[in-house]
Image (cartoon, rainbow, N blue to C red):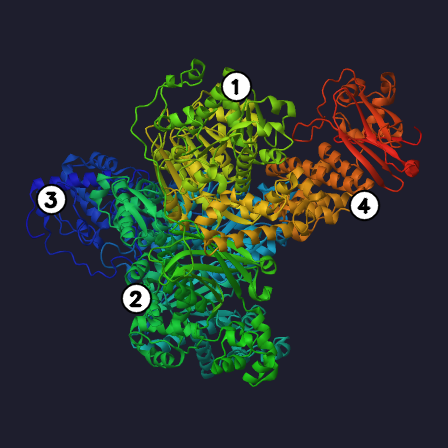
Amino acid sequence: MGYPASDANLHKVASLAQRLFKLQPADHGRSSVFERELNAGEDGVEFGADLIFQPPSRFLVDSLLDNDDLLEGPPSSRHDGWHDLDHGYSNSTYHHAVVDRRKLSLEWLSNACDRIVKECASQLSRDELAMAICRVLNSDKPGEEIAGDLLDLVGVSAFEAVQDLMLHRKELVDAIHQGLLMLKSDKTASNTQLRMPSYGTQVTVQTESERQIDKLRRKEEKRYKRGAENRVEDDLSATNFSSLLRASERRSPIEDLFGHGQGPNSLAVTALPQGTLRKHFKGYEEVIIPPTPTAPMKPGEKLIEIQELDGFAQAAFRGYKSLNRIQSQIFQTTYYTNENILVCAPTGAGKTNIAMIAILHEIGQHFRDGYLHKDEFKIVYVAPMKALAAEVTSAFSHRLSPLNMTVRELTGDMQLSKNELEETQMIVTTPEKWDVITRKSSDMSLSMLVKLLIIDEVHLLNDERGAVIEALVARTLRQVESTQTMIRIVGLSATLPSYLEVAQFLRVNPETGLFFFDSSYRPVPLAQQYIGISEHNFVARNALLNEICYNKVVDSLRQGHQAMVFVHSRKDTAKTAEKLVELSRMNEDLELFKNETHPQFSLIKKEVQKSRNKDLIGFFESGVGIHHAGMLRSDRGLTERLFSDGLIKVLVCTATLAWGVNLPAHTVVIKGTQLYDPKAGGWRDLGMLDVMQIFGRAGRPQFDKSGEGIIITSHDKLAYYLRLLTSQLPIESQFISSLKDNLNAEVALGTVTNVKEACLWLGYTYLSVRMKLNPLAYGIGWDEVMADPSLSSKQRALVTEAARALDKAKMIRFDEKSGNFSCTELGRIASHFYIQYSSVETYNEMLRPHMNDSEVIDMIANSSEFENIQVREEEQNELEMLARTSCPLEVKGGPSNKHGKISILIQLYISRGSIDSFSLVSDAAYISASLARIVRALFEICLRRGWCEMTSFMLEYCKAVDRQIWPHQHPLRQFDKDLSADILRKLEERGADLDRLQEMQEKDIGALIRYAPGGKLVKQYLGYFPWVQLSAAVSPITRTVLKVDLLITPDFVWKDRFHGAAQRWWILDSENDHIYHSELFMLTKRMSRGEPQKLSFTIPIFEPHPPQYFIRAVSDSWLQSEAFYTISFQNLQLPEARTSHTELLDLRPLPVTSLGNRTYESLYNFSHFNPIQTQTFHVLYHTDNNVLLGAPTGSGKTISAELAILHLFNTQPDMKVIYIAPLKAIVRERMNDWRKRLVSQLGKQMVEMTGDHTPDLMALMSADIIISTPEKWDGISRNWHSRSYVTKVGLMILDEIHLLGADRGPILEVIVSRMRYISSQTERSVRFIGLSTALANAGDLADWLGVGETGLFNFKPSVRPVPLEVHIQGYPGKYYCPRMNSMNKPAYAAICTHSPTKPVLIFVSSRRQTRLTALDLIQYAASDEHPRQFLSMPEEVLQMILSQVTDQNLRHTLQFGIGLHHAGLNDKDRSLIEELFANNKIQVLVCTSTLAWGVNLPAHLVIIKGTEYYDGKAKRYVDFPITDILQMMGRAGRPQYDQHGKAVILVHEPKKSFYKKFLYEPFPVESSLKEQLHDHINAEIVSGTICHKEDALHYLTWTYFFRRLVVNPAYYGLEDTAPEILSSYLSRLVQDTFEDLEDSGCIKMNDDGVEPLMLGSIASQYYLSYMTVSMFGSNIGPDTSLEVFLHILSGASEFDELPVRHNEENYNEALSKNVPYMVDNNRLDDPHVKANLLFQAHFSQLELPISDYVTDLKSVLDQSIRIIQAMIDICANSGWLSSTITCMHLLQMVMQGLWYDKDSSLWMLPCMSSDLVSSLGKKGISSVQQLLDLPKANIQTVLEGFPASRISQDLQHFPRVQVKLKVQKSDTDGGTFSLNIKLAKMNSNRKTSRAFAPRFPKIKDEAWWLVLGNPSNSELYAVKRVSFSDRLVTHMELPSTPTNIEGMKLILLSDCYLGFEQEYSIKEL
């Protein structure tokens, strides 16, 4: 060493060695710390092979050892110095020089033992001692124990010797193994029974029969002890040392090949199988490895017969007798359990069938009730190559077709549409493609269905693509844990040494799921030849290569075998084939190749002659074939067939053949191992994967006893391939290289939101498994491992570094302090389009708002995706020529520059140019594969940045790349398959653009292109070219916001061939340089035929106003297909900017006592009014002024209204209060609240008027407070002349009056205008109190309500009793459902951040969303290990509550403390939930938006999850009105408990800025009366308020519409507000309305006025739309049938709003097949069709598909009553008897849910059964009426054993009506007769007159019709509707002409029971 080392230093060395041993992973008993896993670096060169390592001349021991810590940083050559550390022992006799690796043999051990025996006088002889030491060294114990055992053996005096032994334990153990191996091989050679020699030292499984016995003997021993080492001890005991020593000295024939690799990493000599030969020739060297004999069957091993499988599984194994050995061994686990599995087996061992067995197991789980539930599962098969994916797809789809399973390929070549994906059960895909799909949250629904993931060729982990597999597996495993669903992972791989780690990574249980088979399990044993050419001269080397290849082929042919030669480029196939033929001519071996003797030769020859491929024909003559991907499909197929039929003996092909087509041959030659890789931009070595796959093709399973694999490579690569194929290279993870991209993908997906989660996620990768085992390979020093054995800080460092880089590139936002990540648009785009991090950095740098074409192409060329592309000398000429001919744009840097070359190839791709030189072809293919997604990504980036010019520019280029047409070429080139190139060229030359062609005639176009027939053709394709027309209406909302209603009218002929199922359009709204709004619009085939599509959006407008905005619709896929619309601001009048807010004064809060009335004070449970109530107190309580109070939600406005009520009770106790609330829910809340307080404590009467409750006249007369919805009050006050109580109203309270702008606003407007008009007529003043949120235009509202200065209070939105902080977060995602899905995790995070313990309300848009959201929250809580964190009640209370809940979903979520709340729940469930939430028993309530209005349940945190809902009428998602959002936010913050409330609003990214603006700026309220003017004017005409046009104009001036018209004229389509313009506008409006009403038959206009007609009166009376009655008027006839009536009923415009939700047309289609009457199958998404189906389902008592339909049915039935009554009135007024009666039957059907004509009325009895109906029918009883008429005694006899008591009980529900008639002459107008009618109910014990209608959702009273008519001529004279409780006397006038008395009858009909008709003939009286 150069100087003696001191003792102290040596002790340090010893202690360090000791510490090193402690580092050894305890669970893997592998020889020594210094065992280095051989690490194949990126390029596959073994580590250290490129370092020339010389032992240092002297070692700086002192500097190393002065440091107490273990080496701070590893020395450069990774601790190699340790091996060379020489110990200068103080004992001079024991001194040897540097221990050389190569001399570290048993010889050295023998010498050392010699010395020890001499010195220590040991009892053992030298050999015994050495043998004992060998045994100790070779044991599995940890380092310290071994050291202890050695010290016991040799004594303490030889301590240094022990240290030396320990230090070199690995080498000694290797030597021992080598010796044993040699001994064993001698034994084997002498034995007759062949045995399989041990391959790798570490992990080979031996296959002798002893192993079986061994296994039985030691079943409980750990799995990995099955390794060879286990057996070594047994062998050691039987061996003596001297023979071992001699054996270990014997050299293996291969040793000097690479036994002397430089450095410590050289391969252990034991690596090659016994029997290996090595030969030297001139210029090359050959290593021959004999085939491994197939292992014999073990005792107890049997093959599984196919008959043992289930029936359905046998179908997939048609043609198989039994499984092979490997499949049989894994069968049990694969087919009968759900275990994850890893199978390592040689290529060709039938791994496909293993996958098949796993698939069949999965199918078996979904095979129930005799059929396969296909929609429950998906199977994903990930194959590393496209070619392999195609092969797998065809094989599996063929084999699974008997099970009716759909298998589809999803790769770069084969895209699948969303529908195809949904229909597919098994998807075969590449890792990258599946990664892209699972990266998108929009495809979550797909990945959630995956139940089985099969990963083929797992050993790809070592490849650079391995990182993708890691990301996939990690993502899948996390999904399994977070969703708690089972996804089984099946890994298939070639034999690989580090299978334990891979198993650990795949979460495979090593005891049960790990299977390892070595090469003795190859079905056809493989002989291998490795030939290393050492010739250096290029030409000579090539000649030699060809010659060797030829010789090997000829050898094979001589033995009568076929051969395959694999080369690495397409061009090379032909070259090699030529060379082979040429050499065979020279050597006169041509006959060997020829095959003319084959019986089919002449036939086939003719077929071959037809091929266009000259090479193919030429080579066929000589019996040689070629095959590569560049050939035509037909030629490739032909070649494959010829080879498999033996007509071709030699096939020269590229590696794709090995992957894609299963064509085996006896001999496989790999000619050269260098292949050109465009990705790496140069030559690289053939990878392990390819070699294994190619060798897998050697040997045909049915015919050959063995196969032969020959690899011809260069001499320096020989060792590498030998070691690769004897599977000695542990595979390492490549994950770090792509960590940034994968981290970004997880953040974008939302699965990783902070550093902690990122570290967890890393823990699921193979990287984390390997990092702990082989830290050095990942740049982790031993010191780091010691400090942090779990390496968590290293993981954290990796994550943080990646996150910082991503943050710098603006791909995520990384907050270092909290460790949180949030995704950005840029990161999301990069993730979805698979753009690398480095490319994004490039774009950030190079992308500018204005760039020209060549700059853009240059920027794309700079993408890191292309960075490996090289520039080569030999390509220059061709590139220059291409740049001249095919590149329209300038090439930056020219062809000699890398980016220049790429830019030429990009342009070449768009120009469709052709290329000659091979390397350019593959470069171009590589570039074109990535081009489309890069351009798309750039388009998205520009769009997100709002750059107008660049966005359109990039979109053009997206389409240019997709279509391979330049933007400047003629757009009709997109039809180039149909229009000839000639026509297109002429069109371009003549410069005839589309607009010009549109205007020309066919013959002119023909003349233009000088080809007459072409004109017609061009015109035809012009019609197919997608055009749309745009028109827009702009209405200003405020001075800074415009609302745009855009109409899109498609104007082209839809042809599926060109347009597919849907066309996508980008709608861009921009000013010169900025995009203000963009959205993607889907135009479907159905839309293209129908009416124009309407889109609405808002855009900002800035001062000073730009002259115009542009709206463009640009097609997403058609070049030059776009439409423009210009919005000009010349004449646009913007509303006045005036928002006056009332300041909140700093007053002392008033005490309740200031009411001055004890009773009133007791109403309130607080002591002081809040600031707003205090400020408004005087005006409300002490004056009669009208008041408008605008204040934010939750500021106590209701109490302010109560003050006004109390004032009225004080001053005018006889007047009524009417409280109008726009929603039923608010009415209900008000009722409950006031019933408890005002009513009970003040002794007042209160009634509710809503659709559910219609009080009778008496109740209305006596009520003091009437609470009503606007519709009901409108309906009642229309006839105010005849209804005195309407004029008795003294106070009108209008709650939520800002809803004036919403759909039902016009009704509010009308009733207020009417009440003010009434009060002006009756001269009784009505006081108006308006309550609303903060308003932008309070002035106009106040003016309209008649509120003066003093009564107007309009506080700012910020004046809340509990301040509110709002967070708005944007989420991308085009599709609604996936976007909602991606919001669930943020919602959960928001709960944890803002309100971990306080109540939370989550608002969603639909019932389905309430369920999905709740389930996801439960899942996130569970994965946080607090599944019940939201629940705060004891178990027994919970169980009691759950027993009361009826809704299944609710019962499930309640167990986790999450409630659901929506209209689909029944009242009991709903109130239970409200109570639990109000009392903090559950913390989270997920509800639909209705809850915001109806129920006052405030919470600390409100989350609004998504701001759109599905509008069934518009068939798309539309935004909630701002008022709803404000109302929901208003629920945040509980006045009693919280200091502040929080609202988190999760919106669609593009709308973020809109909400930011309007949530703080009050929204102006506009009137929507104009759209609904007809109905209201009609009502006023009927009530007599309007008799002339002047009346109508006067009426309009009372409205709010009139106020706004003056202020914001442009909104209503008026240009100026000059008086004459205004009056002509109004008079035109009135005139148009009158004319429409006249056309529809509602009114009649005459010279001076208007008068109502029957239809108008009916519309007003029944509150129907004028359109509905007009439709009735024209469709109902004298004898309309029931079916037609049902169609007319469903067609009423009242059902327009019936929601048809997403995908409900499918339910409708199913229903339409089960109902008696047909519906229009083309319009299944039409609300009227749905209404019709609901009615029919109700009558047929069908089960409804989903709970939504039940609630829809309720509302349809509810509406239908008044519509049917109107129809009855129309029929009766027209005097049509039969129609009237049919229509009455329809009403009975609705009430009872039965068919009038098909069902017996007996079914009205709840206890009825079909047997009973038929038995009664036989006795002649077919109606309830007949049963009622039977005497009690007879009932029992009729029933025959059915309990009479039940029938009697049921019969009590029905009335028995007795009719007595008398005709008398009326005295007054002489001669007319009237009919006196007495009705009496005979059931004495029946007290109620409530109708018995269990299937009708509402309570209804019985009523009866008396119909006077003549059935013989179907005339109707009179109808009277009566209702009575006991008896009734009434009379009807008979018609004056007595002639008709003949057939005249009085018919009594019930309005709710079937079959209760009684007819009385008048003549008989």
Residue identifier under label 2: 716
Q: Which of pointers 2 and 4 indicates the residue nearer the eye?
A: 4
Cα distance, mark 2 to mark 3?
39 Å
Q: How crowded is mark 3: few (under 14 residues within 10 Å), some or many (20 or more)?
A: some
Q: Residues within 10 Å of mark 1 (few under 14, many from 20)?
A: some
Instruction: Please name whichever residue, 1215 or 1293, is drawn nearer the observer in this view of the structure.
Output: 1215
883 relative to 1085, above or below = below
Q: Residue at x 52, y 69 (%)?
A: 561
Q: What element carries label 3?
A: helix
Q: Is mark 4 on a helix, strand or loop?
A: loop
Residue 1394, percent from left and from top: 35, 34
Q: Which of pointers 1 and 3 indicates the residue nearer the eye?
A: 1
Residue identifier under label 1: 1239
Q: Quadrant of residue 1580?
A: top right
**Looking at the image, do the residues carrying marks 4 and 3 touch, with CB atoms under 8 Å apart?**
no
Amino acid type at image mark 3: Leu
Please indicate, yes or no, whether residue 1306 appears anywhere in the rendered image. yes
- Whichever of callouts 2 and 4 sits on the residue coming sooner in the sequence is 2
Instruction: Please name whichever residue, 1119 or 223, is drawn nearer the observer in this view of the structure.
Output: 1119
Cα distance, mark 1 to mark 2?
101 Å
- Whichever of callouts 1 and 3 sits on the residue coming sooner in the sequence is 3
Residue identifier under label 3: 65
